[in-house]
Amino acid sequence: MNKQAEYVLRTVEERGIRFVRLWFTDVQGFLKSVSISPAELEVAFEEGMTFDGSAVDGYARVQEADMLAQPDPATFQILPWRPDQQVARMFCDIVLPDGAPFEGDPRGVLKRNLAKAADLGFTFYVAPELEFFYFADAGPEPQVLDRGGYFDLTPLDMAQEYRRKTINALELMGIPVEHSHHEVAPSQHEIIVRYTDALTMADNIMTFRLTVKEVAMEHGIYATFMPKPLEAHDGSGMHLHLSLFEGDRNAFYEPGSDNGLSKVGQQFVAGLLTHAAEITAVTNQWVNSYKRLVAGFDAPIWISWARNNQSALVRIPLAKKGKSQSVRVEYRSPDAAANPYLALSAVLGAGLAGIRNGYELPPEVSSNVHALTNAERQAAGISRLPETLAEALDRMEQSELMAETLGEHVFDWFLRNKRREWDRYQHHVSKFELDTYLPVL
Amino acid sequence: MDVAVFPADHSESLASALMAAGIKAQRVTDLEGEFPGDASALVVELGNEPLRRLRMLEALSVESPVPVLAVVDPTQLTMVEGAVGITDFLMAPPDHAELRLRVRRLTHAAGTDEVHHFKDLELNVLTYQAALAGRPIDLTYMEYELLRFFIEHQARVWSREQLLSKVWGYEYYGGARTVDVHVRRLRAKLGEERASWITTVRSVGYRFG
């Protein structure tokens, strides 16, 4: 048994932990949990915990159901929101009975992609901006808690107390928060999490979503990461700040380059732009995700980059002088309801394709892309992100890159599952149609 | 194993027991004077002036940096009862094996090896537990290892590369940024008032304490 596992066993004993939750994630990004008692922990470390994979969305067919959840001791963490009944969690890797990694495990998918980056000498770092809404309850109509706006403070920002408690809980779990504020829409909030390596960050995003919901529930309200819950207001995104490091050197940084980016950084951005349409089904995986990606609500829809232009898909934030470590690119289309393991795999895959194939960075678009005419956009070579889930799936299905990045198992299952979701949506007759057509047709 | 012994002209039986036990004794002539820095316990023979020496120990107990082992006659047992400033006692003439065992137990309990203290932080390396002002903090293994390294190597600056190789070991490929990430997480868990225990030394690395 290695030292990390020993540390976990000892801590469980010393701290009187009564349950250990083994966490893993299904293909759509829902958190799954198996609770075990401390007595079972040693066996879990040595052999893994057997479970029925056919019961998990996107995992297995009935005939190949047996799988093992192998806890990762490095992720052991006591949960701060259950002080009375000591509970801890660990993230798991999913393996088959013969010990081979299961290729439908999203955490495994990200690990495979990080290994590819490591082969090129890169470590991938991510810092997300996570947006969400607080509503009065989980009922069918969203009830906002306040009419506050960007940066507003009390008394409009009644939710700042919940936000403070959430940040506290996050910090106790080793998820440092850079800052937080009231967002543009009523009842909308943003918490910016400090960068870390991509695997830890994907685990952190899973933990973050649960923590926000737990704290809200404790206060009798409801928190949601639904991309666009309020028609008249901005949706909730998850801007991703991305960088690659070679050892302790920022591979995106080059002193004196005109956009602040090195060749590698420029190629990475070119990769993101080239493959943006193909990866969108994964970074924006719900029918509702595309209601956020429309004009007029601070969400990117045009595939372009700029240093300082809120309508661009990729933004290169100005790094302060001498701050070579903080040079990064910001990818602005993903929403917080994505599966973080797959979303980070997709953006990394796109960026690395740019580096591997030496893509050229197109010219910067510093004007407001929304204001250009179609002809002007066409002349500038600016295309649009997919407008619907169906279109995004079409683009993904034709993508070699996505098949390779996700692996065949996840790629096939994801397309099948999401086609069904789109199909269900197509059958739905909406309020819009009834209101618009019934009176006149 | 070094102990301080008082009085300097202690009995022959104590001197030979110390020698047989393999304990290096440093003679102390004045209990209120300079105390030998590397002594991990103080052995005091009550001898022929027990009440006076007990009073001196009582006065010392406030500041004594080490546990005190008293060597007592059977006739002095009633005086030891309720005495302040004595951690443990041993019957005269001392048996060398018992002397050795008691000194070991005392220096162990004092936790010079297993429990580290820094201000209100306590870190127990046997149980892997850390506590702030008596309240346990939840660390991951690497956060714990980093904190342990810092507390065991205080007041000097360590570069990121040094920390990587000493705390993470060579098999880790996360890159030097990993150190920054963990330092930030450690600071978050220590809380705002204590975050400054770990100082960033610009373009060099980190220092604890």
Image (cartoon, rainbow, N blue to C red):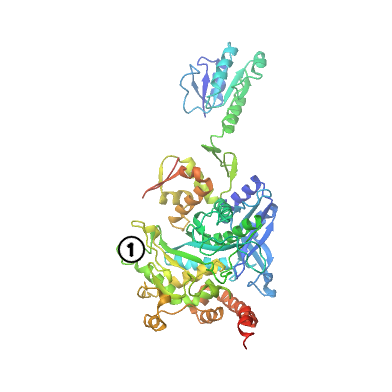
Q: Chain of mark 1?
A: A
Q: Could you tell me residue A264's position as x and y percent?
A: 37, 68
From the image, tell me which residue sits under label 1: A254
The residue sitting at 69% across, 70% down in the picture is A55
Q: How many marks?
A: 1
Q: Could you tell me residue A239's position as x and y percent?
A: 48, 66
Residue A267 vs A381, above or below: the answer is above
Residue A224 vs B13, above or below: the answer is below
The residue sitting at 58% across, 56% down in the picture is A159
Q: Could you tell me residue A44's position as x and y percent?
A: 65, 58
Q: Amino acid at mark 1?
A: Glu
Q: Secondary structure at mark 1?
A: loop
Quarter in which the C terminus of chain B is drawn: top left
Q: Could you tell me residue A5's position as x and y percent?
A: 60, 53
The reply, left or right, for residue B205 in relation to residue B119 is left
Quick one: A342 or A362, which is closer to the camera?
A362
Quick one: A129 or B14, which is closer to the camera?
A129
Quick one: B26 or A118, which is closer to the camera?
A118
Residue A342 vs A214, above or below: the answer is below
The quadrant in which residue A154 appears is: bottom right
Residue that extends furthest to the top in the rendered view of this protein: B48
Q: Residues within 10 Å of mark 1 (few under 14, many from 20)?
A: some
Residue that extends furthest to the bottom in the rendered view of this protein: A441
The residue sitting at 49% across, 41% down in the picture is B151
The quadrant in which residue A330 appears is: bottom left
The reply, left or right, for residue B76 in relation to residue B117 is right
Can the viewer see residue B93? no
